[in-house]
Amino acid sequence: MMIAALNKISSCPPFSTADSLRSLLKYLVTQTVENPGEPIREAHIPAAVFNKTEGFDPRQDSTVRVQTSRLRSKLSEYYLGEGQRDEWVLEVPKGSYMVTLRQREIEALAAIEVVKEKMVAPRWLCALGGFMLGVLLTVLVMRSIA
């Protein structure tokens, strides 16, 4: 399931154009699947993902932490957009580099649909707002001319 979720995510926005984040996610998923229960060490990630030398010092270089934070943000972005209907969710919990796989509950998927419907304003409301803005601008222009 984790590999299938990875493959789906990798080809979709926001990951389709983020090569380094896609590589990081692939590495973390692969390590999690191939070595279950073993923690992924920050010191191994730079050489495997970012082509950094073996002398990498995580205390001096925050690349891995910064990129992992960006990865978490991109995963959230994906699951709020393109992946909002995905049944399975990949997560990289803070304080860890191991990837977790969580199944969404049916109620959570339904709640996303309700929120999405409420966020979209009816077309008549948008038209009314545009009309009112036009009237306001006309009044302001007329006042400045007079």
Image: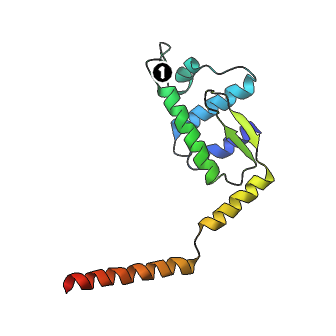
Tell which of 73 and 35 is nearer to you. 73
Residue lying farthest top? 55
Amino acid type of the residue that numbered disc 1 sits on in the rendered structure: Lys
Picture layout, residue 137 above or below residue 83: below
Residue 139, located in which quarter of the rendered image?
bottom left
Residue at position x 52%, y 27% in the image: 64
Picture layout, residue 62 above or below residue 108: above
Residue lying farthest left? 146
Q: Position of residue 54 (x, y in %)?
A: 50, 14
Residue at position x 70%, y 27% in the image: 32
Residue at position x 71%, y 34% in the image: 100
Q: Position of residue 7 (x, y in %)?
A: 68, 42
Instruction: Identify the element where label 1 is drawn.
Output: loop
Q: Residues within 10 Å of mark 1 (few under 14, many from 20)?
A: few
Picture quarter with the C terminus: bottom left
Residue at position x 55%, y 81% in the image: 124
Tell which of 11 and 87 is nearer to you. 87
Tell which of 10 and 81 is nearer to you. 81
- Left or right, residue 108 beside residue 137: right
Picture layout, residue 126 above or below residue 146: above
Q: Which residue is mark 1?
A: 52
Q: Position of residue 92 (x, y in %)?
A: 64, 34
